[in-house]
Amino acid sequence: MDEMKKDEIWVGTEKFVPYISAEEIQKRIAEMGTELSEEYKSKLPIFIGVLNGSFMFMADLLKNVTINCEMDFFKLSSYGDTKISSGKVKLVKDLNADIKDRHLIIVEDIVDSGLSIKYIEELIAEHNPASMKVATLLSKPESLKYDVKIDYIGFEIPSKFVIGYGLDYAQKYRNLTSIYALSE
């Protein structure tokens, strides 16, 4: 059965149901791409994806950005194979680009507690960028534990566990084109 038509996905004994459709995701990303293109039209920003989760969002976002830009990636680890963050972030892959005096747009799949963004802010501050903003596909405002600013938000969602479109469960289900939420 085609993934778009599935009304549920089972992960072991846990049921996930459709939450945000592929069409809704692409429509919102197009709007974000337009907004970013306008805001950065006289600059040459570097989009910095946070791997692994941001790769689908970042690819689609950059397809909708109409200005010259560069890209790079961080790889952080804070979840392992569980649904709950370990509460510790470690850098697995650093940037290749020189970010001093550059305009950075950090691209995240989801901002949950804000721990990863806080970690990135501290890491990047040492390099003196001209500016840093955060773009995320999903934000869970009621889950925030750290005071972080999110500049571009695709969708605000409640504290639900979600999979698909880059978001994983034990490194699986990232390839779903829609987002599914754990059923209550």
Image (spheres, rainbow, N blue to C red):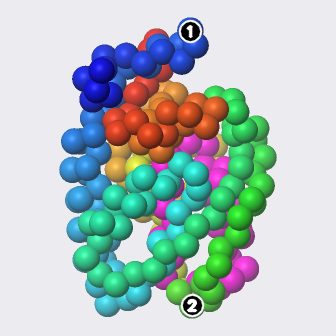
Q: Which residue is mark 2?
A: 101
Q: Nearer the viewer, mark 1 or mark 2?
A: 1
Give above or below for 163 relative to 97. Answer: above
Q: CA distance from mark 1 to mark 2?
A: 50 Å
* Neighbourhood count class around disc 2 (C-alpha, 10 Å): few under 14, some 14–19, many 20 upward: few
Residue 52 visible in the current orientation: yes
* Neighbourhood count class around disc 1 (C-alpha, 10 Å): few under 14, some 14–19, many 20 upward: few
Q: Nearer the viewer, residue 38 or 20?
A: 20
- The N terminus appears in which quarter of the rendering? top left
Give above or below for 77 relative to 15. Answer: below
Residue 169 pos. (x, y %): 58, 31
Q: Extreme front residue here?
A: 1
- Labelled disc at residue 66: none
Residue 150 visible in the current orientation: no
Say which residue appears at 35% left-offset and 39% top-offset.
177
Residue 14 pos. (x, y %): 53, 13
Q: Nearer the viewer, residue 169 or 1?
A: 1
Mark 1 residue type: Thr
Highlighted range, magenta: 103-129
Residue 142 pos. (x, y %): 51, 36
Say which residue appears at 57% left-offset and 90% top-offset.
101
Mark 2 residue type: Asp
Say which residue appears at 65% left-offset and 53% top-offset.
116
Q: Which residue is mark 1?
A: 13
Mark 2, secondary structure of its residue: loop
Q: Is residue 40 left or right of residue 149?
A: left
Say which residue appears at 54% left-offset and 18% top-offset.
11
Q: Is residue 129 left or right of residue 153?
A: right
Q: Quadrant of residue 42?
A: bottom left
Residue 50 pos. (x, y %): 57, 59
Residue 115, magenta (yes or no): yes
